[in-house]
Image (cartoon, rainbow, N blue to C red):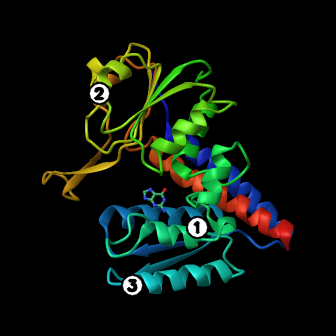
């Protein structure tokens, strides 16, 4: 069994980007600038956005955090999005999800200029991705693909079972893995809350991607020996014995499933850090595109 070490690979990717940034600096070019918008004080979102901003610093990107109060109106947020679209200093930005309930998430994501949409959430970018065109690919599915590529995991002709149909992970990864190319060419089954007998399907899977957010959902008796297991779940489970009052766990019953798997991602340290690395890669691409246009 091989652990797909997202922490290690994400550090390699960050080192590669840092090298490109230092070359940009030597040529006297502007370095990439990522902005992150966070509305409210959701604990997990604060952690993610903090990691994104810290990673920018580590690799030499400029970063800006726009932290707005929970009561921010949709109109105010749309104004900030419009300002970021117009700001020539900002190469790309993200609006951290989830947004407070009183804000229409779709309306906000639609307002992000596709050229600055380093999350790849705008319909223009999602559509391009689905049509095999070059674009910003959402960081989590992009990170999974990159992890599979760098470990040279064979996916061609394999049966990949995806659990979860979210716009951010399940839907895009189902499209990417069925496309032509490396870490792709798989036969994909997409499972969701209305799927009957998920275990029957996962037992047939050569690759399982679980993006459900239910701790320990995927048990060893649901997995075929030798399967590749990608765990996208990141759930905080309350635990008073821990310093923070919680621990982080994935969708997979890791200790038991790892005994059957050929490759498996840990949580934390698997898909999570890859997401950040790929967001940075998208921001580098955004900068290069802006420079080419200037
Ligand atoms: N919330 C959970 N994952 C993501 C992500 O990849 N991007 C943004 N903007 N919000 C998220």
Q: Earlier in the sequence, mark 3 or mark 1?
A: 1
Local crowd at mark 2 within 10 Å, few (<14), some, or many (≥20)?
Answer: few
Q: Secondary structure at mark 3?
A: loop
Q: Earlier in the sequence, mark 3 or mark 2?
A: 3
The residue lying furthest to the left in this view is 240
In the picture of the structure, the residue carrying the numbered disc 3 is: 73
In the picture of the structure, the residue carrying the numbered disc 1 is: 57
Residue drawn at the location 31% of the way across and 45% of the way down = 213
Local crowd at mark 3 within 10 Å, few (<14), some, or many (≥20)?
Answer: some
Where 188 falls versus 158 (above or below)?
A: below
Question: Horizontal placement of 148 versus 272: left or right?
Answer: right
Disc on res. 38: none
The residue lying furthest to the top in this view is 225
Residue drawn at the location 68% of the way across and 51% of the way down = 128
Q: Secondary structure at mark 1?
A: helix
Question: Horizontal placement of 288 versus 175: left or right?
Answer: right
Q: Secondary structure at mark 2?
A: loop
Q: CA distance from mark 1 to mark 2?
A: 46 Å
Foreground tag (3 vs 2): 2
- Which quadrant of the view contains residue 163? top left
- Image marks 3 and 2: residues in contact by CB distance under 8 Å: no
- Residue 243 placed where, x, y %? 21, 57
Residue drawn at the location 70% of the way across and 68% of the way down = 32
Q: In which quadrant of the rendered image does the N terminus lie? A: top left
Question: Horizontal placement of 159 versus 20: left or right?
Answer: left
Disc on res. 196: 2
Q: Is 227 or 75 nearer to us in this picture?
A: 75
Q: Is mark 2 within 8 Å of ligand 1?
A: no
- Residue 238 placed where, x, y %? 17, 53
- Residue 46 placed where, x, y %? 38, 67
- Residue 260 placed where, x, y %? 36, 16
Q: Is residue 79 among the parts visible in the rendering?
A: yes
């Amino acid at each position: 069994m091989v652990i797909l070490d997202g922490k290690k690979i994400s550090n390699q990717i960050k080192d590669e980007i840092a090298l490109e940034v230092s070359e940009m600096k030597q040529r006297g070019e502007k370095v990439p600038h990522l902005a992150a918008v966070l509305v409210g004080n959701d604990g997990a979102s604060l952690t993610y956005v903090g990691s994104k901003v810290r990673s920018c610093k580590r690799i030499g990107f400029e970063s800006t955090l726009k932290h707005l109060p929970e009561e921010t109106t949709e109109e105010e947020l749309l104004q900030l999005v419009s300002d970021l679209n117009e700001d020539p200093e900002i190469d790309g930005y993200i609006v951290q999800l989830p947004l407070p309930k009183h804000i229409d998430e779709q309306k906000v994501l639609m307002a992000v200029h596709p050229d600055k949409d380093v999350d790849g959430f705008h319909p223009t970018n999602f559509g391009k991705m689905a049509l095999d065109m070059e674009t910003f690919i959402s960081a989590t599915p992009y990170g999974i693909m990159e992890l599979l590529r760098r470990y040279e995991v064979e996916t061609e002709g394999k049966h990949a079972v995806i659990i979860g149909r979210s716009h951010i992970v399940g839907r895009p990864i189902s499209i990417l893995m069925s496309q032509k190319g490396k870490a792709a060419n798989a036969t994909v089954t997409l499972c969701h809350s209305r799927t009957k007998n998920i275990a029957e399907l996962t037992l047939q899977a050569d690759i399982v991607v679980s993006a459900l957010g239910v701790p320990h959902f995927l048990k060893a008796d649901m997995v075929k020996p030798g399967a590749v297991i990608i765990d996208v779940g990141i759930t905080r489970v309350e635990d008073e014995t821990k310093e923070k009052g919680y621990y982080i766990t994935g969708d997979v019953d890791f200790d038991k499933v790892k005994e059957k798997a050929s490759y498996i991602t840990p949580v934390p340290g698997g898909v999570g850090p890859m997401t950040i690395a790929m967001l940075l890669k998208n921001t580098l691409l955004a900068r290069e595109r802006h420079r080419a246009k200037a």
